[in-house]
Image (tube, rainbow, N blue to C red):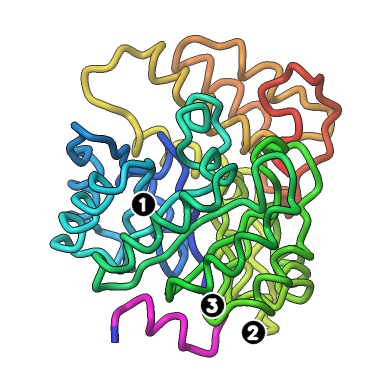
């Protein structure tokens, strides 16, 4: 039995790190493993089209997986021959499954009728899944949203998913157009659990162990896929396991978070890259970490304005060099509609 199928047939809820483009690279996955980590990792998506070749850094991450846990390779695209070609290549690598992305909400993706854009064409999804299921001899999984701009299409998609003997369906229970700015419609995940013969994993707005328990209760899902919550709190997977076992939860203190930021800086730092570019890259992660630092949003306000390493860590130390416990859920910061983070932490 494959590693993924073994996990899915175990008694415990399966915990997965969500694929996040330009985030879930080998360095980040390795760092997550140091904090307990998930049961299974998803790669960034491989862009597939008529003249594509698999991204070398993703292939490297698969071949040199140091997490000790299985890894799933995710593809994004709409050209059937190219997807089949890439899937056959990926099966020769040490992957636990091949996954198709039907949920990416980035306009640059869905405008090309890839990712979440494919949900506008259920018949095309049907054809792609049929071709891939025939070509893939290891576990084949799909990550989807509940529709492009109307969740009513989910009722049309469910029989398609059921028809192609998927090994796992992960459902992010928002439409593509809702991005990350709405409530998550968990009832759609529950409907998928009831309708499909394969296991279903829930995705969206899992930011604490208590929230994880609530989502599992509401949906009946086989497990949870977590993305942004794990960036903010790398101990989250461990806390969920502790909660499920009835154990006291590890609560990080300020210096624990400060240590995580230092480890993250060291992990994602690319030799030879100028300091200002590295600090700018770190802001992408700190946009999520900062939601759990102070209720006023002052940490985020200050960190977004630095451009060098010394000032970056000066601000981090000013807010986090203490032994007080940190909150287990993000603060509901009042953000503007134009703000990068408006709603995205939900």
Residue 224 highlighted magenta (yes or no)? no
**Of pointers 2 and 1, the one earlier in the residue sequence:** 1
Q: Nearer the viewer, residue 118 or 324?
A: 118
Is residue 71 in view? no
Q: Position of residue 137 (x, y in %)?
A: 24, 73
Residue appearing at x 62%, y 50% in the figure = 229
- Tell me the magenta residue range: 2-13
**Of pointers 1 and 3, the one earlier in the residue sequence:** 1
The answer to whether 52 is drawn above or below residue 216 in the figure is above
**Of pointers 3 and 2, the one earlier in the residue sequence:** 3
Q: Secondary structure at mark 3?
A: loop
Mark 2 lies on residue: 245
Residue 8 highlighted magenta (yes or no)? yes
Within the image, what quadrant is residue 191 found in?
bottom right
Residue appearing at x 19%, y 64% in the figure = 94
Q: From mark 1 to mark 3, how far is it between C-alphas? A: 18 Å
Q: Position of residue 293 (x, y in %)?
A: 71, 37
| Cβ–Cβ under 8 Å for marks 3 and 2 | no
The circle drawn on residue 74 is: 1
Q: From mark 2 to mark 1, how far is it between C-alphas? A: 31 Å
Q: From mark 3 to mark 2, how far is it between C-alphas? A: 22 Å
The answer to whether 205 is drawn above or below residue 312 in the figure is below
How crowded pointer 2 is (Cα within 10 Å; few <14, some 14-19, many 20+) is rated as: few
Q: Secondary structure at mark 2?
A: loop
Q: Position of residue 311 (x, y in %)?
A: 53, 14
Mark 3 lies on residue: 199
Residue appearing at x 25%, y 59% in the figure = 66
Q: Nearer the viewer, residue 152 or 25?
A: 152
Can you say which quadrant of the picture contains the N terminus? bottom left
Within the image, what quadrant is residue 100 found in?
bottom left
Q: Which mark lies nearer to you, 3 or 2?
A: 3
| Cβ–Cβ under 8 Å for marks 1 and 3 | no
């Amino acid at each position: 039995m494959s590693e993924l199928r073994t996990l899915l047939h175990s008694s415990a809820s399966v915990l997965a790190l969500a694929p996040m483009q330009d985030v879930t690279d080998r360095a980040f996955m390795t760092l997550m493993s140091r904090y307990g980590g998930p049961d299974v990792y998803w790669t960034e998506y491989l862009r597939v089209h008529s003249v594509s070749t698999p991204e070398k850094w993703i292939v490297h991450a698969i071949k040199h997986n140091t997490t000790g846990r299985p890894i799933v390779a995710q593809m994004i695209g709409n050209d059937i021959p190219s997807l089949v070609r890439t899937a056959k290549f990926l099966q020769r690598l040490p992957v636990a499954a091949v996954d198709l992305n039907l949920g990416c909400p980035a306009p640059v993706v869905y405008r090309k009728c890839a990712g979440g854009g494919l949900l506008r064409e259920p018949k095309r999804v049907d054809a792609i899944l049929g071709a891939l299921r025939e070509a893939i001899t290891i576990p084949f999984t799909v990550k989807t949203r509940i529709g492009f701009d109307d969740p009513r299409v989910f009722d049309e998609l469910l029989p398609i998913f059921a028809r192609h003997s998927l090994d796992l369906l992960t459902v992010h229970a928002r439409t593509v157009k809702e991005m990350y700015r709405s409530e998550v419609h968990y009832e759609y995940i529950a409907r998928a659990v009831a309708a499909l013969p394969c296991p279903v994993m829930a995705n969206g707005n899992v930011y604490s162990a208590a929230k994880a328990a609530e989502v599992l209760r509401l949906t009946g899902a086989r497990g949870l896929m977590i993305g942004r919550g794990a960036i903010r709190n790398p101990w989250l997977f461990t806390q969920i396991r502790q909660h499920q076992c009835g154990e006291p939860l590890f609560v990080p203190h300020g210096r624990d978070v400060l240590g995580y930021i230092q480890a993250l800086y060291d992990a994602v730092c690319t030799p030879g890259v100028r300091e200002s570019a590295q600090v700018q890259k770190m802001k992408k992660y700190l946009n999520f970490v900062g939601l759990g630092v102070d209720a006023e949003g002052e940490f985020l306000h200050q960190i977004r304005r630095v451009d060098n390493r010394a000032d970056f860590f000066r601000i981090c130390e000013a807010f986090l060099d203490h032994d007080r416990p940190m909150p287990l859920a993000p603060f509901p910061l009042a953000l503007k509609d134009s703000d990068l983070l408006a709603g995205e932490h939900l």
